[in-house]
Amino acid sequence: MDEITLVLDNIEHKLKKLLDRNEKLVRRIEELEAQNQNLLEQISKINDNNAQLREELIVVKSAKSLEGVDRSMVKQKINELLREIEKSTVLLNK
């Protein structure tokens, strides 16, 4: 009988250790999931910022390319681009 009691006590002890370990692992998973979500949000913000900076770079490059160009030529180019945009919009709306 003593041997069975010892075996049962040993099993009970191991079971408690496993349950404690499981609880710690569940908490760790929750922490990692929260951290992962936070990192995904940071990546999204960085990507948004990157897109905005790319747009600003295009504007700066465009502005630099227009330096020293006659104003009437600039207006003409802008009008051409606006017509292209309008044509594209019409095609997209069809």
Image (spheres, helix red, strand yellow):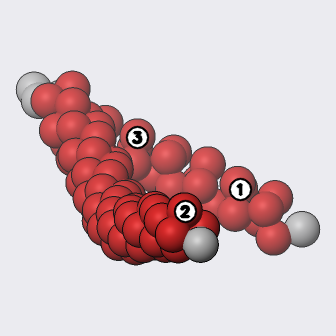
Labels 3 & 1 near each other (Cβ < 8 A): no
Work out how far the residue at label 1 is from the one at label 2, CA to CA, in angstroms. Answer: 90 Å
Asked if the residue at tag 2 contacts the one at tag 1, i.e. Cβ–Cβ closer than 8 Å, the answer is no
Residue 26's quadrant in the figure?
A: bottom left
Residue in front for this viewpoint, 75 or 19: 19
Q: Mark 3 points at which residue?
A: 77
| Amino acid carrying mark 2 in the image | Glu
Mark whose residue sits in front, 2 or 3: 2
Q: Dot 3: what SS?
A: helix
Spatial separation of the CA atoms under disc 3 and disc 1: 15 Å
- Asked whether disc 2 touches disc 3, contact meaning CB atoms under 8 Å apart, the reply is no
Q: Which mark is residue 3?
A: 2
Q: Which amino acid does label 1 sit on?
A: Lys
> Three-letter amino acid code at disc 3?
Lys
Q: Which residue is drawn at 41% across and 68% down?
A: 13
Q: In which quarter of the image is the C terminus?
A: bottom right
**Residue 11 is at least partly visible in this image:** no
Residue 80 in the image, given as x and y percentages of width and height? 51, 45
Residue at image position (81%, 70%) is: 93
Percent of width and height locating residue 55: 30, 47
Most foreground residue, 42 or 78? 42
Q: Which numbered disc, 3 or 1, marks the residue that appears first in the sequence? A: 3
- Residue 59's disc is none
Q: Mark 3: few, some, or many residues within 10 Å (few <14, many ≥20)?
A: few
